Amino acid sequence: MKIIAIILVVKLFLLSSSLAEEPDYTNDLNQNIREFNWKIKNTSIPVGSQSSTTEIITLTKNNWILKCAIHYFPYNRSDTRCSLP
C-alpha cells in the first residue's frame, strides 16, 4: 500500500511540472501582444541619455510576467529584448 502511495505522489509531481511550461514569446513586442495574447500591465517612463533611451514594458499572461526592454537609439533605430524574470 505504501508503494502505491509513493507512486501516486511521484506521478503528481511529474504532472504538475509538465503543466508549468513557459508560455511562448519572442523579442518582438507587437508579436507577443497580437499572436501570443500577452496583455500590457505596466509601462515605465523612458529614461536615458543622448546616446540611447530605454523603456520597460511589463506584460502578463496566465500569471506569467514578461519584461520587454525597448532601447531607442538616434536615427530612428531601436532594439527590443524580452525575457521572463
Image (cartoon, rainbow, N blue to C red):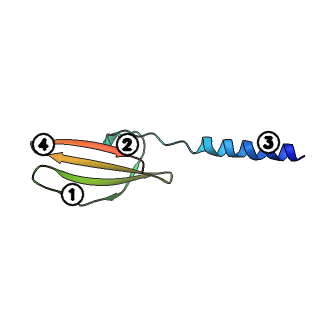
Look at the numbered disc 4 and give the secondary structure of its residue: loop
Q: CA distance from mark 1 to mark 4?
A: 15 Å
Q: Mark 2 or mark 1: which comes first in sequence?
A: 2
What residue is shown with label 3?
7
Res 46 label: 1
What residue is shown with label 4?
76
Residue 27: horizontal and vertical position, in percent? 33, 40
Taking the spot 22% from the left edge, 47% from the top edge, the residue there is: 71
Q: Mark 1 or mark 4: which comes first in sequence?
A: 1
**Pointers 2 and 1 in contact (C-beta within 8 Å):** no
Q: CA distance from mark 2 to mark 4?
A: 22 Å
What residue is shown with label 2?
32
**Pointers 2 and 4 in contact (C-beta within 8 Å):** no
Quarter-of-image position of residue 37:
top left
Q: Amino acid at mark 2?
A: Asn
Quarter-of-image position of residue 80:
top left
Q: CA distance from mark 2 to mark 3?
A: 39 Å
